Amino acid sequence: MILITIDTKSRHPLFEQIVDQIRSLIESGGLKEGEVLPSTRKLAENVGVNRATVYRAYEELWAAGYIEAVAGGYSRVRKRIDPVKQQAEIVVDRFGWEGHLSDAFMSISQTRLFSSAQLDGLIDFRSLSPDSDLLPVEDFRRSMNAVIQTEGASVLQYGDPAGYLPLRELLARQMKQHGIHTSADEIVLTNGMQNGIELVCRLLTNPGDCVFVESPTYASALTMMNYLGLKVQGISMTSASMNLDELEASLRKQKPKLIYSMPTFHNPTGISTSQSHRERLLRICERYGVPLVEDGFEEEMKYFGKAVLPVKSMDRKQQLIYLGTFSKILFPGLRIGWIVAPVTLAEKLRRMKEVTDLSGSPLTQAAVFRFCDQGFYELHKKRIHRAYRKRMQLALAACREFLPQQQVQFTRPEGGYLIWLTTCFPLEREAELNQKLIGTGVAVSPGSRFFAADPEKAHFRLSIAHRKEDEIVEGIKRIAEVIQNFN
């Protein structure tokens, strides 16, 4: 039995204390290669913490290559190749920076970030990054080179905080295809969707203010809102949408500074709401005078059925802010998103952008404009629609065929990348179930991180964005087997 001691009074997060001590034991030889670690349940009991804390520590050690999952749901010390020793030892925190950290950071320090690490041999359903084999790298390279040749040094200078004007004009035209009539003056380019959410929240809220979100919702938005000191209240989801009766009841008790909603290919559930739901949501916001922030992160990823226009397309009173991004359909690494807002608000967002990071990259924005203007974007969109339509069909067929209906329910998205699993098991068993999935070679996103408050059941999010067809089917088979045998 390994000896771990926890200091509950330390500002150092509990899971990091466990990580540091196990890592030290491995590096010092106290834990040998192949040695099996205690189960999350056993170590949690011995240390006096909850199992989710131990699981998170193990996940950090998996990602760093210190341990590996083995059959039976256990973890063991992995064989490691010692790195070349540095001439001088690295001194960790000699100054004592832990005592200087802000309360804002400490509020998110125990929030599990989504790992980009690819664990060997796993079918990884966590990533929302598109399949690299589908990315139009050569077409974009030509667009980038053409911009440098034609515009030269001008796109290598600081740019307009609102973003490259031709791209904003192009986006205004593109928004009209979704029923949103806007202009370049109402559009502010951002460094991705996360930056857009941050700018809007910083502009409209103060620490301590209340905001309403769907429950579950985009996990990184929750983290951002917590970092900003906001009180986040979740409005439960039905099988088809945010529960609008619950929303109205909550609004009668408290008026939030904003409502954040994702009506199209909702993250994490993948569902899209109906036209009538969107109309009623807008009427409720108008009746109570609350700004609505609409996240359209996968607006253009419709594969099946008839498209429903964004809520913003019906916004006659201009109390809705729309957020978009290229990350989920083009290149995530470009970090280009946009905000559509009434012109007076857009100017204030432009000022916020200038204060926080001066501007985005004119070169990158100009290259995206040329890529789109030359027709490459539409060709790419058609290509990935064909690929992901087939992958989603396979995924849903595999869910229908293999998942045990008495133990797990799944959503049936009409587009996007996401499928949401709701199990019959209590939340307390989510970490254990997740570890067993890792042990059988499958990685998923635990559902609890998508909720503002703990749900009753264990949930999981599957993303098919980065997986090939055969991996999708095999991965769902393994998930089904684990759930069926879980007790």
Image: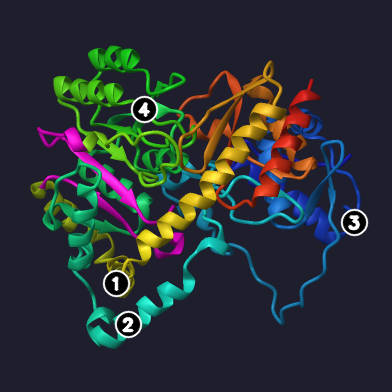
Q: Which residue is mark 3?
A: 33
Q: Which residue is mark 2?
A: 146
Q: How many marks?
A: 4
Q: Which residue is mark 1?
A: 370
Q: Position of residue 147 (x, y in %)?
A: 30, 80
| Residue contact at pointers 1 and 2, CB within 8 angstroms | yes
Labelled pair 4, 1 in contact (Cβ < 8 Å): no
Q: Residue at x 42, y 61 (%)?
A: 380
* Eye-nearest disc, 3 or 4: 4
Q: Crowding at label 1, few (<14), some or many (≥20) Cα neighbours within 10 Å? A: many
Q: Which comes sooner in the sequence, label 1 or label 3?
A: 3
Which amino acid is tagged 2?
A: Ala
Q: Is residue 15 magenta?
A: no
Say which amino acid is labelled 4: Thr
The residue labelled by disc 4 is 273
Q: Secondary structure at mark 4?
A: loop
Element under disc 2: helix
- Chain-order first, disc 2 or disc 3: 3
Characterize the local packing of mark 2: few (<14), some (14-19) or many (20 or more) Cα atoms within 10 angstroms. Answer: some
Q: Earlier in the sequence, mark 2 or mark 4?
A: 2
Q: CA distance from mark 3 to mark 4?
A: 51 Å
Q: Secondary structure at mark 1?
A: helix
Assess whether mark 3 and mark 1 are in contact (beta carbons under 8 angstroms): no
